[in-house]
Image (cartoon, grey):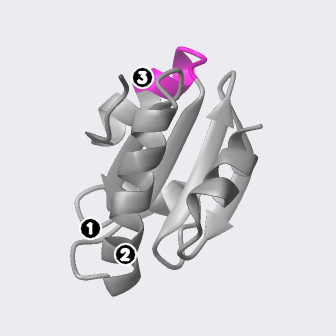
Amino acid sequence: MSQLIHANAEQFNTAVQNGETVLADFSATWCGPCKMLEPIITSFAERNPNITVMKIDVDENNDLAASFQIMSVPTILVFKNGQLVNRQTGVVPIEALENLVL
């Protein structure tokens, strides 16, 4: 069973460079919508053990957030084979997350 990983830039970069399918939730502890999205992201991780699901705090990893031009949180990025393939901003239902990784 997959779980939500609270990741730093190094962990994120390693997963992406290894070609894993990565769903990265860029968020902040002070962000209300981010708190609303967390149980959805957690449930998604549990339902999709073949996907690496990461939560990345933009305040602790501001260089990484800036490199992907994260302007608002939550922002979800999906990577496959080392490439950014999808991007979504805001709170979305679990079905929308599943569609992002198809």
Give me the C-alpha separation between circle 2 and circle 1.
18 Å
Question: From the viewer's perspective, is 74 left or right of 21?
Answer: left
- Counting from the top left corner in percent of width and height, residue 7 is at 28, 41
For discs 2 and 3, the disc positioned in front in the rendered view: 2
Disc 2 vs disc 3: Cβ atoms closer than 8 Å?
Answer: no
Q: Earlier in the sequence, mark 2 or mark 1?
A: 2
Amino acid of disc 1: Asp
Residue at 60%, 27% (x, y): give it. 21
Q: Residue furthest top?
A: 18
Q: Earlier in the sequence, mark 1 or mark 3?
A: 3
- The circle on residue 59 is 1
Q: Label 2 crowding class (10 Å Cα cut-off): few <14, some 14-19, many 20+?
A: some
Give me the C-alpha separation between circle 1 and circle 3.
20 Å
Q: Nearer the viewer, residue 67 or 50?
A: 50
The residue pinned by badge 3 equals 14
In the picture, residue 59 is in which quadrant? bottom left
Magenta residues, as a range? Answer: 14-20
Q: Quadrant of the C terminus?
A: top right
- Counting from the top left corner in percent of width and height, residue 47 is at 48, 35
Q: Secondary structure at mark 2?
A: helix
Residue at 68%, 59% (x, y): give it. 96
Give me the C-alpha separation between circle 2 and circle 3.
28 Å
Residue at 39%, 56% (x, y): give it. 63
Disc 2 vs disc 1: Cβ atoms closer than 8 Å?
Answer: no
The residue pinned by badge 2 equals 36
